[in-house]
Image (cartoon, rainbow, N blue to C red):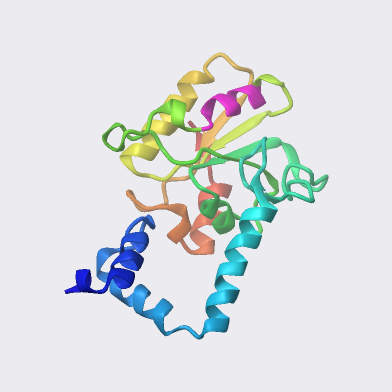
Amino acid sequence: MVEELPSLAHLLKILQQVPYLASKNLYRVASHFLEMQPQQVAQFCASLEVVKERLRKCEHCFFWQEISAGCIFCASHKRDQATVCVVETWQEIVAIEKTKGYTGLYHVLGGSISPLEGVSAEDLTIDALVERIEKGTIKELILATNQTPEGEATASYIARKLKGKNIVISCLARGLPVGSSLEGMDRLTVFKALSERRPF
């Protein structure tokens, strides 16, 4: 039936390309866009274009930064330059920052090693992380990957890569539920996991 409405079919096809958008919500999201006022549609599209034009990834930590300014973490003199917290995605940085209990730097891997999904170590920013470590200014690395099989495998891989380096490697406390992601945890849980981190 949808095929008889080519414009609607095209919209649904585009929405299917959005990761994490569950199939059961596809029609609801499409309906939301279709019912938006023309001015709202224009504002939405303009916002996407502005974001694409003005944001880029920091070449050091791979968090987003305004092109016209330095990275809010790497360029800050208030951050502890000797400590780096390694996360899978930038969303986890948002969760950690909400705790107001961490003042170091970050490194965004861009995901986790997952052979089943075709993601290898080379697809992540692990080599860039090793380069940062080899510069010698970082004293502690906190492996804050998610407590999933993929996250644990990624953390172990990084630890092996850095074996023999003069750096302390720690990981989050095990108070986080197995299989969970930092992004979905409450502030207190994330804060305790960071503050009670242990040697890896």
Q: Is residue 103 placed above or below 133 in the rendered structure?
A: below
Viewer-proximal residue, 52 or 161? 52
- Displayed quadrant of residue 18: bottom left
Dominant secondary structure (helix, strand or loop) of the stretch shown in magenta: helix
> Which residue is painted at 55% across and 24% down in the image?
127
Residue 147: tell me if it is visible: yes
Residue closest to the eye, 105 or 190: 105
Please tell me whether residue 149 is drawn above or below residue 55 in the rendered image: above
Identify the residue at image location x=67%, y=35%.
60
Q: Is residue 130 one of those drawn in magenta?
A: yes
Q: Where is residue 103 in the image (x, y as percent from the top left)?
A: 70, 48
Q: In the image, 152: left or right of 102?
A: left
Furthest residue in direction left, as rendered = 1
Q: Quadrant of residue 184?
A: bottom left
The percent position of residue 97, horizontal first and vertical second, equals 62, 57
Q: Tell me: residue 60, above or below residue 194.
A: above
Q: Can residue 98 be seen in this view?
A: no
Instruction: Name the side, left or right, on which 190 lies relative to 83.
Output: left
Apparent side of residue 39 relative to residue 159 in the rendered image (left or right): right
Residue shown at 50%/50% (left/top)?
Answer: 193
Q: Position of residue 149 (x, y in %)?
A: 31, 39
Residue 173 vs residue 183, the one in the foreground:
183
Residue range of the region highlighted in magenta in the rendering: 125-133
Q: Quadrant of the N terminus?
A: bottom left
